[in-house]
């Protein structure tokens, strides 16, 4: 466990440094919009709507980033020379994957927070029928299952397929496979559920996904080690 | 398929002993039944054509990847780490600098001598806080070698330390390696610059057609009367 936390500290620092320009730009944009007087916002709305559209697009990108970034974190640099630095640490591939999964959570939350802050700031430009991107969770979806799905389950499926495909351009087929299999597993686990367990369908699905997550992590680590990634 | 050949006198306990080591990438064989040994206090050059498995061999020796067959045994003296793999310029992210790299080494390697590393970095007179983006590959190589050689290890591994570097800096790197290599330790380096390094290398290992031939450079000069590079070209002429 100490080994994992040691690696996690370095991995977190590494990813933060790699993303620092992106984060600074976001922070700067938020500050600029926050600091703009209302009169300036009104002027922009009427005379330079492309600026609000641009900020809106950036918000949408942050929102989609929240959905897809966890998988990106896991997939970074498996086939690149810089992987050597991770291999040199001596930590097992399994623990490297677990570290990536753990870092998914704050990274994705940061993106989600940014989309919420941005949405609040966009109120300054609101007028009449103008709509803008706003990421929300509905009650029906359930925060915890959705969070687990997006932060853990789908990224694990994605990583497994990505390493199994074994080529740098395998991101897109891996994504497609992950996003196809994820709802299928939910459906299949409920189709084959014995009638007696029907009231606990959600719990059973969750357990099936947890078991599959562990299997995907172990499978991905085994593929990476066997192929020398 | 050519067999492994060795023209090396009987040896004391080797530091590194690779026996019948094989490795494949996606079921394509790269190394087949490789035998390699490294004695203490030796500098060994590994040469071969592109894609022959030189870097892979180095990573196997460094324990970064596992062989599909065979055994790799490291027997370091007491108190020394078995191996220190020196990073190359492509393997280090550009946003890092010498200080951050030193922090990485301090963080993960108990055998890392921070004082020695600082001393070596100071002797290079290179900017230590500047991101590697702004340094040349030769400068990054010198920084990476300083840090790699600052680990208290029995065997140092370096992958093409002279690649893509202008002649003056190549000379500086050669001198740096000779000056900073701890006594009694060994160095294995992948290289294409055989003529430049021939008087520095004690042994040459040629990777050819998935196998290896290991020979002392003194034997090449004495027995064959040719340069190390000419010997390499002679041994690989059917490629």
Image (cartoon, rainbow, N blue to C red):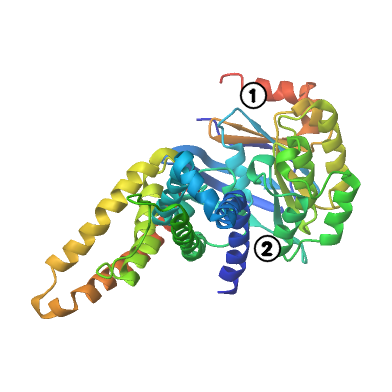
Q: Earlier in the sequence, mark 1 or mark 2?
A: 2
B198 and B133: which is toward the camera: B133
Where is B1 relative to B225, above or below? below
The chain that hosts pointer 1 is B
The image's mark for residue A67 is none
Question: Residue A10: x and y, percent?
Answer: 63, 62
Query: In front of the other: label 1 or label 2?
Result: 2
| Residue B54 in the image: above or below residue B239 | below
Q: Position of residue B233 (x, y in %)?
A: 67, 21
Q: Residue B104 appears in which quarter of the rendering? A: bottom right
| Other residues around mark 2 within 10 Å, as few (<14) / some (14–19) / many (≥20) | some
In the picture as drawn, the residue positioned furthest to the front comes out as A39
Q: Foreground: A192 or A137?
A: A137
Disc 1 to disc 2, C-alpha distance: 41 Å
User: Does B16 sit above or below residue B46?
Assistant: below
Query: Is residue A166 visible to the viewer in this orientation of the structure?
Result: yes
Classed neighbour count for the residue bearing mark 1: other residues with Cα under 10 Å, few (<14), some (14–19), many (≥20): some
Q: To which residue does mark 2 refer? A: B108
Q: Chain of mark 2?
A: B
Q: Give a yes or no on whether discs 1 and 2 share a subunit.
A: yes
Residue at the disc numbered 1: B235
Viewport quadrant of the C terminus of chain B: top right
Residue B219 drawn at (x, y percent):
78, 31
The one nearer the camera, A147 or B163, is A147
Location of residue B170 in the rendering, given as x and y in whole percent from the top left corner: 81, 32
Left/right placement of residue A140 relative to residue B140 reads left
Describe the element under mark 2 as helix, strand or loop.
helix
The answer to whether A11 appears left or right of A200 in the picture is: right
Q: Secondary structure at mark 1?
A: helix
Q: Is residue A39 above or below residue B167?
A: below
Left or right, A97 with respect to A198, comes to right
């Amino acid at each position: 466990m100490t080994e994992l936390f040691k690696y996690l500290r370095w991995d977190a620092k590494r990813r933060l440094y790699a993303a620092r320009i992106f984060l600074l730009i976001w922070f700067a944009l938020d500050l600029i919009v926050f600091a703009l007087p209302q009169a300036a916002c009104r002027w922009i709305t009427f005379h330079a709507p492309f600026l609000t559209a641009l900020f809106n697009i950036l918000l949408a990108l942050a929102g989609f980033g929240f959905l897809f970034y966890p998988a990106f974190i896991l997939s970074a640099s498996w086939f690149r020379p810089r992987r050597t630095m991770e291999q040199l640490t001596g930590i097992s591939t399994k623990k490297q994957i677990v570290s990536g999964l753990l870092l998914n959570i704050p990274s994705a939350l940061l993106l989600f927070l940014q989309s919420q802050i941005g949405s609040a700031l966009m109120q300054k430009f609101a007028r009449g029928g103008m709509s803008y991107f706003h990421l929300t969770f509905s009650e029906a979806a359930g925060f915890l299952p959705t969070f687990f799905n997006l932060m853990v389950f789908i990224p694990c499926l994605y990583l497994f397929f990505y390493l199994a495909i074994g080529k740098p351009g395998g991101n897109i087929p891996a994504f497609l496979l992950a996003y196809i299999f994820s709802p299928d597993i939910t459906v299949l686990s409920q189709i084959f559920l014995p009638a007696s367990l029907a009231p606990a369908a959600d719990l059973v699905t969750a357990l099936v996904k947890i078991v599959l997550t562990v299997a995907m992590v172990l499978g991905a680590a085994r593929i990476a080690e066997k192929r020398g990634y | 398929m050519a067999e492994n050949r060795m023209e090396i006198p009987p040896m004391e306990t080797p530091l590194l002993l690779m026996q019948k080591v094989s490795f494949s990438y996606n079921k394509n064989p790269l190394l087949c039944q490789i035998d390699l040994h490294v004695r203490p206090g030796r500098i060994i050059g590994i040469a071969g054509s592109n894609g022959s498995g030189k870097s892979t061999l180095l990573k196997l020796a460094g324990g970064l990847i596992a062989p599909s067959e065979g055994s790799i045994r490291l027997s370091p003296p007491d108190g020394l780490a078995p191996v220190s793999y020196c990073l190359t310029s492509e393997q280090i992210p550009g946003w890092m600098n010498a200080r951050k790299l030193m922090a990485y080494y301090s963080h993960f390697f108990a055998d890392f001598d921070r004082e020695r590393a600082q001393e070596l970095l100071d002797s290079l007179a290179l900017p230590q806080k500047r991101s590697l983006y702004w340094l040349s590959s030769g400068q990054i190589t010198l920084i990476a070698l300083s840090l790699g050689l600052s680990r208290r290890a029995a065997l140092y591994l370096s992958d093409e330390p002279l690649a893509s570097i202008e002649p003056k800096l190549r000379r500086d790197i050669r001198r740096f390696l000779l000056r900073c290599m701890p006594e009694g330790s060994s160095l294995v380096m992948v290289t294409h610059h055989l003529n430049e390094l021939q008087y520095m290398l004690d042994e040459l290992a040629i990777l050819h057609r998935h196998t290896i031939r290991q020979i002392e450079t003194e034997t090449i000069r004495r027995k064959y009367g040719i340069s190390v590079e000419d010997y390499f070209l002679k041994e690989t002429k059917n490629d």
